[in-house]
Image (tube, rainbow, N blue to C red):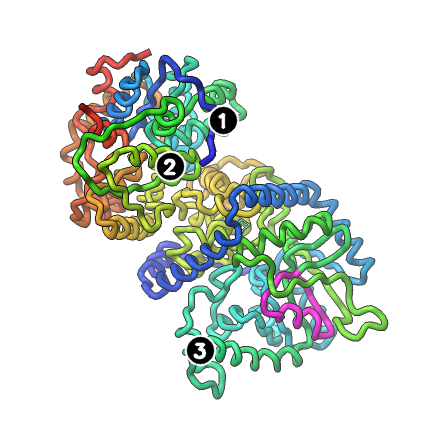
């Protein structure tokens, strides 16, 4: 797997961008992400001024509104620290789309500066911090969902999976169509509800056939979507963000 | 001629999604095509290099498009090929008919051509008393069943063998029922053979036109393209004007990318290069070759630097083979000639957003198309741009046809409110608190609007009692 950015040396401090979805629905995943960093001796800063990366509006055809929200993030993360994001999707927005969104704006340089400091959580844990995990949990079979943005935009899936593979009591059973989208796509899931439902139905069937008792992913958007579909069908396979999972299994 | 097509996207989508047979046929076919492509491009580094070259070639061609087209015309003319320019499909059809009339021709044999589909040429010719017979096997199959192509490379991909067996048995006189592929091939071959010799004019598409030499390149697997372009005394080639490349040496990398991406072939069985009509002393080949260059909105697309990238397309179909939406809908549900990811960026620009804008919403932005596109078209960026244009009421000179069709107060206000709440920290904090308090109630909300769409197959998300902002503060995580 190729490296997507020049990795910095081990920093003293990092920013944590929690993402709006984690903020509202999966805060424990966010807390776990920060704890994993702190545990490695990194000082974590969580700017209370942060909100959403702006992607919902950006992908729906409302770039002005997206910029308005994105400007607030430019303000919230001004220092030269790495910005760690527990999501391929929001990380991709900051890293790959902010420069485009601000290309002809006064904040172009600021956006570039932020983009160049963005790292997805697992890529940072593996590449910069070289974390080593000791599994203290019971044997478990899990399966892994790759979000499209983590896979194709941030290209960090190998890092995420390498962390799970470090856990010796965890057996990962791969999906048959791991590279296929779960059908979330933000507003796509409601604007094209039929299509999105057809896609997630296939994803759910794929998850079921693995026989795993837990679904992991690095993106809470997908987890909310797939988790909702599992619950709708009354299938008792819970979903969990990788950060929370790793923390639980390695905590003393 | 330019009849306005009204496509009922929601109805089409629902119908396609409920068609289990179609879903199974498509899944099987797409899996095979995808696997073949992966086998051929098994070395990712080599593939990246090759497609960087393909991208560069197409970009260079588009940069100098007007000059290259002029050069192509000059060269072709010098070689004896008659060049015609058509701004609209109606004009292109008119030119075809005029040529046919001049030769008193009433029977046309056709090789596969998506541009002729764009012109609805068969239908037009039929209306004017000309029989147009498709000779590509897939095209022949769907013509028998009065259908249009559902895929730009494999037009009958939505049908499986049993369906084709039944179709042949029912539609071709004196044909016993058989499911044996070789026998089905033999049946089609027998019918087509006779027609090849009766054809008075051959019509084909063009995969690449080389400006430097005035050469028309045609890629095919069945030999029917060669028959159509050599057996009848007149050959008409129809081409979208973006298909021109600068030099002959540009062709091999593009050809490799095209066949590899489309069917996983190193090279197709036939590759035709047509540079002139039959010359004096030659024993075969058509006496007349015509090239019709169709614009149909392409020059408008070309004028916009971002949208221009749409025109890099070499029509390999890989984007649809890998698209999770196309795989579940098939081509017909899109309602227009070009389906899948390329169709979703091209069609709204050709037909206008007010007609085909919904195609730009039928994507989860998963990016599987971009990952395989052999000329690196930023399909997702262009889809996003089309979504922006759908709400863009201002009259910008480079705006896409039919822009602003979606503008509505409710949606604009919703996004304005969303932006405000996410741009102003204290509003955001209050909202988070409210949602936290309301959280437990949400799963019991009545099903309306977007909630309804979500709830049709997914339980509603629960809002956490405390936001990450609140938890971080409680845990004294530094706020700078
Ligand atoms: S957009 Fe790319 S992948 Fe799709 S048909 Fe065109 S060249 Fe092929």
Gap between marks 3 and 2 measured at Cα: 44 Å
Q: Residue at x 59, y 45 (%)?
A: B50
- The picture places residue A99, in percent across and down from the top left corner, at 49, 26
Chain of the residue where label 1 is placed in the rendered structure: A
Tag of residue A99? 1
Residue indicated by mark 2: A157
User: Does residue A169 appear left or right of residue A98 in this picture?
Assistant: left
Chain of the residue where label 2 is placed in the rendered structure: A
Local secondary structure at mark 1: helix
Residue indicated by mark 3: B180
Q: Residue at x 22, y 49 (%)?
A: A211
Q: Residue at x 41, y 29 (%)?
A: A66
Considering depth in this image, is B86 or A129 the residue closer to the camera?
Answer: A129
Q: Identify the mark nearer the N-term, 1 or 2.
A: 1
Q: Residues within 10 Å of mark 2 (few under 14, many from 20)?
A: many
User: Does residue A83 appear left or right of residue B343 in this picture?
Assistant: left
Gap between marks 1 and 2 measured at Cα: 23 Å
Q: Nearer the viewer, mark 3 or mark 1?
A: 3
Which span is picked out in magenta?
A: B218-238
Q: Residues within 10 Å of mark 3 (few under 14, many from 20)?
A: few
Q: Is residue B341 above or below residue B166?
A: above
Considering depth in this image, is B314 or A246 the residue closer to the camera?
Answer: A246
Can the viewer see residue B355 in this picture? no
Quarter the C terminus of chain B occupies: top left
Q: Quadrant of residue A218?
A: top left
Quarter the N terminus of chain B occupies: bottom right
Local secondary structure at mark 2: helix
- Magenta includes A200? no
Disc 3 vs disc 2: Cβ atoms closer than 8 Å?
no
Considering depth in this image, is A230 or B72 the residue closer to the camera?
Answer: A230
- The picture places residue B240, in percent across and down from the top left corner, at 63, 55
């Amino acid at each position: 797997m190729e490296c997507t950015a020049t990795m910095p040396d081990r920093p003293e401090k990092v920013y944590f961008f929690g993402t709006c979805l984690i903020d509202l629905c999966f805060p424990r995943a966010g807390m776990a992400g920060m704890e994993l960093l702190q545990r490695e001796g990194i000082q974590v800063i969580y700017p209370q001024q942060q909100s959403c990366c702006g992607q919902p509006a950006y992908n729906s055809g409302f770039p002005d509104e997206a910029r308005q929200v994105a400007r607030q993030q430019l303000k919230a993360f001004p220092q030269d620290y790495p910005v760690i994001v527990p999501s391929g999707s929001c990380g991709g927005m900051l890293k790959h789309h902010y420069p485009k969104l601000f290309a002809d704006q006064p904040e172009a340089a600021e956006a570039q500066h932020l983009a160049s400091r963005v790292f997805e959580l697992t890529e940072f844990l593996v590449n910069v911090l070289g974390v080593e995990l000791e599994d203290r949990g019971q044997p478990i079979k899990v399966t892994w969902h790759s979000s499209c943005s983590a896979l194709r935009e941030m290209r960090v899936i190998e890092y995420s999976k390498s962390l799970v593979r470090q856990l010796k009591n965890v057996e990962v059973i791969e999906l048959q169509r791991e590279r296929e989208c779960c059908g979330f796509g933000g507003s796509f899931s409601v604007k094209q509800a039929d299509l999105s439902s057809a896609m997630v139905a296939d994803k759910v069937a794929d998850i079921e056939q693995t026989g795993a008792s837990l679904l992991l992913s690095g993106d809470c958007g997908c987890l909310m979507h797939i988790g909702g579909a599992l619950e709708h069908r009354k299938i008792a396979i819970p979903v969990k963000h990788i950060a929370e999972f790793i923390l639980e299994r390695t905590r003393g | 001629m330019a009849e306005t097509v009204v496509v009922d996207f929601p109805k089409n989508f629902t119908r396609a999604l409920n068609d289990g047979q179609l879903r199974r046929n498509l899944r099987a076919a797409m899996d095979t095509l995808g696997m073949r492509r992966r086998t051929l491009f098994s070395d990712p580094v080599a593939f990246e290099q090759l497609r960087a070259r393909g991208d560069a070639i197409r970009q260079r061609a588009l940069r100098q498009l007007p000059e290259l087209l002029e050069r192509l015309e000059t060269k072709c003319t010098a070689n004896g090929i008659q060049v015609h320019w058509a701004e609209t499909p109606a004009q292109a059809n008119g030119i075809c008919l005029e040529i046919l009339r001049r030769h008193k021709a009433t029977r046309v044999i056709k090789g596969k051509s998506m541009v002729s589909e764009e012109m609805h040429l068969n239908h037009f010719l039929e209306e004017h008393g000309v029989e147009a017979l498709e000779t590509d096997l897939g095209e022949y199959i769907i013509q028998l069943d009065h259908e249009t192509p559902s895929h730009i490379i494999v037009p009958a991909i939505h049908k499986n063998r049993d369906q084709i067996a039944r179709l042949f048995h029912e539609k071709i006189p004196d044909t016993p029922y058989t499911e044996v592929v070789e026998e089905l091939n033999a049946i089609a071959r027998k019918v087509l053979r006779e027609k090849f010799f009766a054809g008075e004019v051959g019509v084909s598409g063009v995969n690449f036109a080389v400006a430097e030499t005035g050469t028309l390149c045609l890629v095919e697997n069945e030999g029917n393209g060669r028959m159509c372009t050599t057996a009848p005394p007149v050959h008409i080639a129809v081409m979208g004007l973006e298909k021109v490349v600068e030099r002959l040496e540009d062709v091999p990398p593009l050809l490799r990318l095209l066949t590899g991406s489309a069917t996983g072939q190193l090279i197709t069985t036939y590759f035709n290069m047509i540079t002139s009509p039959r010359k004096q002393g030659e024993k075969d080949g058509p006496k007349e070759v015509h090239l019709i260059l169709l614009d149909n909105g392409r020059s408008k697309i070309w004028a916009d630097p971002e949208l221009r990238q749409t025109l890099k397309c070499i029509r390999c179909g890989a984007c649809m083979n890998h698209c999770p939406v196309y795989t579940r809908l098939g081509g017909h549900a899109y309602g227009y000639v070009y389906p899948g990811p390329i169709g979703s960026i091209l069609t709204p620009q050709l037909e206008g957003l007010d007609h085909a804008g919904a195609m730009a919403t039928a994507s989860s932005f998963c990016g599987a198309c971009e990952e395989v596109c052999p000329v690196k078209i930023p399909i997702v960026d262009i889809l996003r741009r089309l979504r922006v244009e759908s709400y863009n009421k201002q009259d910008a000179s480079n705006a896409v046809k039919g822009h602003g069709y979606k503008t509505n107060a409710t949606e604009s206000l919703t996004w304005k409110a969303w932006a405000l709440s996410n741009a102003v920290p204290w509003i955001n904090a209050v909202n988070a608190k409210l949602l936290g308090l309301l959280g437990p109630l949400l799963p019991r909300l009545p099903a309306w609007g977007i909630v309804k769409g979500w709830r049709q197959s997914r339980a509603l998300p629960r809002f956490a009692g405390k936001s990450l902002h609140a938890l971080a503060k409680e845990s004294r995580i530094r706020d700078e």
